[in-house]
Image (tube, rainbow, N blue to C red):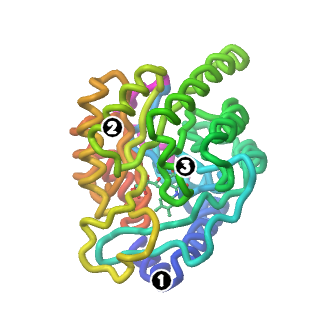
């Protein structure tokens, strides 16, 4: 069924295909065509104080504005991450900004955090009344300089807190100028210190502890990963998502889009992100759980991420190329 739909969707411009398929999913959900399938219960697991019905989640970026939470939840995921959202709405980069690398099962995107802004985003979440685990991925506006970035993260963090299962701090998108520099020691320490302090305040106010996790880039060196790991431990960060997309182009064999700027995901990212997970697993020494993401296109890829130290996994490109049967296959394989 998905192969059939994919054939037609892949004839269209990728961004248009994305909107059509999300609206199609919403309609199918509305008319009850997705069934009443609950999340696949496969080895429920408690991580970061949350009970995940299964270990397979949807990665950030597919539902940037939290508009499709319920339809997406019908695909069997154990958790769903929405965003990245920024304090103010912004249009993102000029089109075209999304490229399908069909032969390599990869995607290059340079969206640049196009989103409706945190206030409308929260309205969308409230409307969805989702009962499962919702990750809210937050970032900074493109025109906020790095030395003011903490304020942007705090604005989103405070507004997201009451509605989030966990909050993901995105300091690794390659499509917002200099954002990835926030992974550097000095910036990261200031950011984590502020978020750790705010978490304590909000914990008291709302009487619930919402974990926060940091999403990192696959392009960090081992030395950089070690410094990041030290800070994550120092500031009691609850988890780390490894990884975002890469700006490097190794592993692309045949696509004509190889020279397009942006973050590369899917098949060509797989090895690189697994290596980051493997290294982080050593430097974190089991103290902080890792959410593994990057190039999971088959059940075996998911198992490999788990075997290298991931406690949970997420997919994005795999869903585009393989459809939602990949979620079932991953759950079964991990079981
Ligand atoms: C089109 C597209 C948009 C994305 N947007 C975001 C985003 O807004 N925030 C974020 O943290 N990651 C974003 N990502 C990265 C994914 O969440 C994921 O980390 C990455 O694609 C690697 O996983 P994959 O190989 O399964 O796609 C995006 C990825 C794609 C392909």
Marks 1 and 2, the one that precedes in the sequence = 1
Indicate which label's residue lies in the foreground, 1 or 2: 2
Is residue 36 placed above or below 19 in the rendered structure?
A: above
**Magenta-highlighted residues:** 35-49
| Viewer-nearest of discs 3 and 2 | 2
On residue 140, the disc is none
| Mark 2 C-beta to ligand 1 under 8 Å | no
From the top left corner, tell me how far across and down residue 169 is, in percent: 54, 39
Mark 3 touching mark 1, by CB under 8 A? no
Residue 151 or residue 315, whichever sits in front: 151
Q: Identify which residue, 169 or 24, lies in the foreground.
A: 169
Residue under circle 1? 8
The tag on residue 73 is 3
| Image spot of residue 79 (x, y percent) | 50, 41
Taking the spot 62% from the left edge, 34% from the top edge, the residue there is: 164
In what element is the residue under mark 1?
helix
Mark 3 or mark 1: name the one nearer the start of the chain: 1
SS at circle 3: helix
Quadrant in the rendering for residue 52: top left
Where is residue 297 drawn, in percent x and y? 31, 59
Q: Which mark is residue 225?
A: 2
For the point 52% across and 51% down, the residue is: 60
Name the residue at the bottom extreme.
11
**Local secondary structure at mark 2:** helix
């Amino acid at each position: 069924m998905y192969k059939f739909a994919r054939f037609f969707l892949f004839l269209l411009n990728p961004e248009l295909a994305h909107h059509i398929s999300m609206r199609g999913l919403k309609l199918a959900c509305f008319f009850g065509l997705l069934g009443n399938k609950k999340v696949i219960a496969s080895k429920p697991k408690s991580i970061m104080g949350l009970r995940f019905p299964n270990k397979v989640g949807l990665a950030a970026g597919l539902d940037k504005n939290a508009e499709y939470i319920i339809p997406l939840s019908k695909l069997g995921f154990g958790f769903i991450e929405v965003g990245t959202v920024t304090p103010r709405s912004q249009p993102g980069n000029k089109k075209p900004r999304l490229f399908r690398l069909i032969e390599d099962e990869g995607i290059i995107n340079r969206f640049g955090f196009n989103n409706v802004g945190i206030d409308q985003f929260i309205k969308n979440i409230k409307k969805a009344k989702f009962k499962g685990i919702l990750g809210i991925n937050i970032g900074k506006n493109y025109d906020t300089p790095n030395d003011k970035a903490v304020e942007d993260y705090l604005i989103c963090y405070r507004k997201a807190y009451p509605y989030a299962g966990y909050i993901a701090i995105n300091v690794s998108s390659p499509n917002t100028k200099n954002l990835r520099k926030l992974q550097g020691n000095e910036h990261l320490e200031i950011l984590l210190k502020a978020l750790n302090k705010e978490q304590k305040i909000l914990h008291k106010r709302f009487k619930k502890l919402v974990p926060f996790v940091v999403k990192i880039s696959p392009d960090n060196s081992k030395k950089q990963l070690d410094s990041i790991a030290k800070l994550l431990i120092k500031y009691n960060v609850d988890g780390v998502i490894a990884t975002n997309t890469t700006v490097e182009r190794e592993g692309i064999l045949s696509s004509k889009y190889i020279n397009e700027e942006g973050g590369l995901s899917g098949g060509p990212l797989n090895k690189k992100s697994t290596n980051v997970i493997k290294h982080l697993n050593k430097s974190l020494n089991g103290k902080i759980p890792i959410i593994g993401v990057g190039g999971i296109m088959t059940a075996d890829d998911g198992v490999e991420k788990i075997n290298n130290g991931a406690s949970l996994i997420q997919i994005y490109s795999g869903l585009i190329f393989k459809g939602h049967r990949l979620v079932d296959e991953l759950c079964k394989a991990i079981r």
